[in-house]
Every structure is written in C-alpha cells, then in structure tokens.
Amino acid sequence: MAPALFITFEGIDGAGKSTQARRLAEALRREGHEVVETREPGGSPGAEEIRRLLVEGAPARWSPETEILLFTAARRDHLEKTIAPALARGAVVVCDRFADSTRVYQGARRPGLRPLVDELHARVIGREPDLTILIDMDPETAFHRGLARNTGENRFEEMGLAFQRRLREGFLALAREWPERIVVVDGARAPEELEREILAIVHERLQ
Ligand SMILES: Nc1ncnc2c1ncn2[C@@H]1O[C@H](COP(=O)(O)OP(=O)(O)OP(=O)(O)O)[C@@H](O)[C@H]1O
Ligand SMILES: Cc1cn([C@H]2C[C@H](O)[C@@H](COP(=O)(O)O)O2)c(=O)[nH]c1=O
C-alpha cells in the first residue's frame, strides 16, 4: 500500500500556509500520490459549520475556554470524517493548521490554558501529524499580507500585531518542544523557493 503521511502547515496569519499547502499537494499529485488537501478549522461538513462560528464576528465573541471546546469539536469531526479515512487508504493528507494552532492561539489568549488544550487533545483527538511545516514569518509582513485579503474571516487577525508577535513566539517554542515533528522554514522568500525546500523535506519522510 502507498505510504500514508499526515502533514500539517502551521504559522501566524498570512505566513503563506495555504499557498504552500496547495503547491505541495499539487507537486505530490504530479508524482502520483493520492493527496487529500484539507484545513482547520473545517475540513468536513460539520467542522466547516463550526468554522463559521469561530472565525466570524467580534474578537471577544467567545471566551478562550469556549474556543478550545469549539476548535476541538471541529477537529474531532474532521479527524473522523476526513483525515482518518484518508490515511487508512494510504493517502497523503496535507492539512492547513491542526492542534498546534489551538496550543498557540488559545494559549496566547490567556496563559495557563495549555493543560486544558493538552488534556482534551489526549482524550478526544489522540494523534499528532507525522510532519509539521512551520512557516516562520516576521509578523508585520505577514499581518499586512493577511489583512490585504479581506476575507470576512478576520476575527483573529483583528486581535492585532502584538497578538501576532506572541503567536510567532508560541509556534517557535512548540518547534523546540517537538524537534522531530516540527520543521521550521523561513517564509520570507519567493513561493517557488519555499516550495522546493518543503518538497525536499517531505521526500525525506516519504522514503
Ligand atoms: N512567499 C510569499 N511571498 C509573497 N506573498 C505571498 C507568499 N506566500 C503567500 N503570499 C501571499 O500572501 C497572502 C497570504 O498567503 P496565504 O493565504 O497562503 O497565507 P496563510 O498563512 O494561509 O494565511 P491565513 O492563516 O491568514 O489563512 C496571499 O495573498 C498570498 O498570495
Ligand atoms: C485551527 C485553529 C485556528 N485558529 C485561528 C487561526 C486563524 O486566525 C483562524 C482561521 O484560520 P485560517 O488559517 O485563516 O483558515 O483561526 C485558532 O485560533 N485555533 C485553532 O485551533
């Protein structure tokens, strides 16, 4: 059977995750892999419904605890309906954000919440990606890239530059915590150059 691989992209808003996830999926398909391209919050019909609750509306719409529950509920449905079946048939799953985003974003909203995130994750999700590409980026540049898109899903981007700086530090701290799983790449480069580096990293894991 083809080698199943669960790959996630992480990073602050506007870092280039969706762009690189799409490029990687296309490159792997050209090589003959079955690739399931997905995203969080979302990735299954039920989780996409929860996404709308999470990313639209005022920054203070939900408490950090409620956010953790909603993101985790969406993730459970996504895992059951999309990720686990794809991996079971040997596909490569390329996912734009996963549990590291909850650890970092909800953790950045209020210190001390990480144990709650970890406990829920252990009880109802129970798996980590095989490989996480962390696109590291200067928050000023990424922030303006993100705002320029004006998608109507800007609840977290509207929390401001200081919040994005805390997120960047949070992601880099996670990379130190999981050095085998999380590979940090410099996002301030041309998309083609970044794509080549990421494809080389993925090829190593597919061997
Ligand atoms: N390497 C790059 N250089 C310059 N611009 C880029 C690069 N990668 C992506 N962009 C542009 O920056 C914007 C944000 O990119 P993208 O949507 O891929 O980021 P993202 O990390 O998925 O953002 P978000 O987390 O907010 O969804 C887009 O307009 C995209 O075209
Ligand atoms: C999975 C996840 C996401 N978020 C935040 C991060 C983004 O600002 C939005 C939506 O993500 P997208 O990349 O723009 O599609 O949701 C979060 O706070 N916690 C999470 O677990």
Image (cartoon, grey):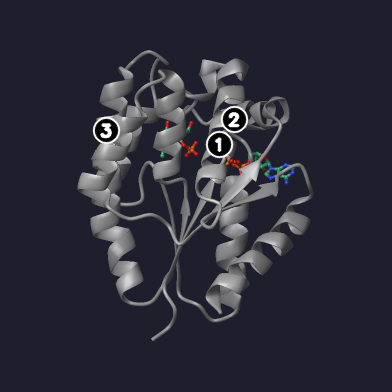
- The residue drawn where x is 46% and y is 45% is 97
Check disc 2: other Cα within 10 Å, few if <14, some if 14-19, many if 20+.
some
Q: Is residue 206 above or below residue 155?
A: below
Q: Are marks 3 and 2 in contact (CB under 8 Å)?
A: no
Mark 2–mark 1 Cα distance, whole angstroms, equals: 6 Å
- Name the residue beneath numbered marker 2: 169
Q: Secondary structure at mark 1?
A: helix
Q: Which residue is mark 1?
A: 173
**Which is closer to the viewer, label 3 or label 2?**
2
Identity of the amino acid at label 1?
Ala
133 or 140: which is nearer to us? 133
Whole-angstrom CA distance, mark 1 to mark 3, is 24 Å
Q: Image height check: is 160 above or below 26?
A: above
Q: Are marks 1 and 3 in contact (CB under 8 Å)?
A: no
The structure residue drawn at horizontal position 30% and vertical position 17%, both measured from the top left corner, is 63
Q: Which mark is residue 139?
A: none
Q: Which residue is mark 3?
A: 70
Query: What quarter of the picture does the N terminus occupy?
Result: bottom left
Helix, strand or loop at label 2? It is helix
Q: Residues within 10 Å of mark 3 (few under 14, many from 20)?
A: some
Query: For residue 112, what is the image quadrant?
Result: top left
Amino acid beneath label 3: Leu
Q: Residue at x 71, y 61 (%)?
A: 197
Q: Cβ–Cβ below 8 Å for labels 2 and 1?
A: yes
Q: Position of residue 43 (x, y in %)?
A: 36, 51
- Badge nearest the viewer, 1 or 3: 1
Which of the two residues, 166 or 199, is positioned nearer the viewer here?
A: 166
Badge 3 marks a residue whose secondary structure is helix
Q: Earlier in the sequence, mark 1 or mark 3?
A: 3
